[in-house]
Amino acid sequence: MKLFYFFGLLLSLGSAKAQTDKSELKTSVNNNTLLWEISGNGLAKPSYLFGTFHLLCREDINFSNAFKKAIENSNEVCMELDMDDPATLMGGIMMMSMKEGKKLKDLYTPEEYKKISDFFKDSLQTPIGLFQSIKPELLTALIYPKMMPCNTVSGVEEEIMQLARAGNKEIKGLETMAFQSSVFDSIPYDKQARHLLEAIDSVEKRKISFGLLLTAYKNQQLDELEKLMNDPESGIEDNREVLLDNRNKNWVTQLKEIMKNTSVFTAVGAGHLIGENGLIALLRAEGYTVRGLENK
């Protein structure tokens, strides 16, 4: 199921190191932070927004006291998916497959398919035959853990859920697995197949780009993340509306209703926070005060 941690952007958490405990959450001086407070516009209590990086090296997942305080101050925790619901995981397995019986072999020439098959066998130690029905964009995600500078990676959302459970917080999701699956069904399979082939052809180059992205994230440099994501070679621009903008707008509509009634800690991929159609800008446009909090 780690394939689904990469839905959209492959961006999420890698958090700041622990800091000395303070009774109040302090504003970040330069807004270089992954942790944001949402207040004003009639809210009785603040809510919080956090940018995650779905998979990180285990040693990089160290939540700050400010992060823990924000969860403590919230009544519930909301993520892209309700990963605390077993039905979500089971539904994900069922929805990975392409529609109409489409197979991976159907999308490539024999030479291209052999290149992909050899890569999975040699670099991922996995026979491509296991993934004949899987959407190619999800297979592209399998390459990224191999770009991590460690052997052991962990799901950040899983770590957040542990904190939420420890604080008896209700865990919810902004989307269903069916919706996330439909997002990838809206991108033509042949286009997804090209992305997979291009990723395999440029693994070493992408490893460098991914390293820059990871560094910017761990340093909590949202401006740098935005710059890297806006690079045409990132491949995001082609599907930005489907993968980011439309989903952000839908989430803001939901959060407006949720925050009226309760304080919520929302953790989504960091790529959803940035840009003119990012959650920070959209929430501000709705009249909320969104301020960066120290997260070191």
Image (cartoon, rainbow, N blue to C red):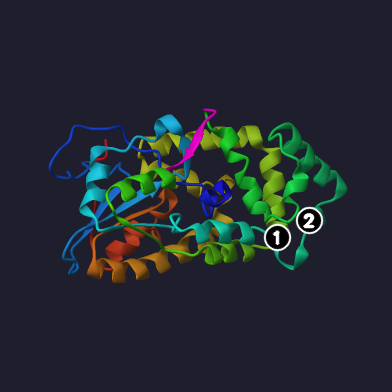
Q: Residue at x 57, y 37 (%)?
A: 145
Between 264 and 168, the one lying in front of the other is: 168
SS of the residue at dot 2? helix
**Label tally:** 2
Q: CA distance from mark 1 to mark 2?
A: 8 Å
Left or right placement of residue 195 versus residue 31 in this view? right
Q: Disc 1 vs disc 2: Cβ atoms closer than 8 Å?
A: yes
Which label's residue is closer to the chain start, 1 or 2? Answer: 2
Q: In which quadrant of the rendered view does residue 14 lie?
A: top left
Vertical arrangement, residue 87 with respect to residue 220, above or below:
below
Q: Residue at x 35, y 39 (%)?
A: 220
Q: Residues within 10 Å of mark 1 (few under 14, many from 20)?
A: many
Vertical arrangement, residue 41 with respect to residue 191, above or below:
below
Question: What residue would you read off at disc 1?
Answer: 189
Left or right placement of residue 187 versus residue 154 in this view? right
Instruction: Write down the region rendered in magenta.
Output: 150-156
Left or right placement of residue 105 versus residue 5 in this view? right
Q: Is residue 153 magenta?
A: yes
Question: What residue would you read off at disc 2?
Answer: 107
Vertical arrangement, residue 253 with respect to residue 273, above or below:
below
Identify which amino acid the numbered label 1 is placed on: Tyr
Q: Residue at x 48, y 59 (%)?
A: 244
Quarter of the image containing the C terminus? top left
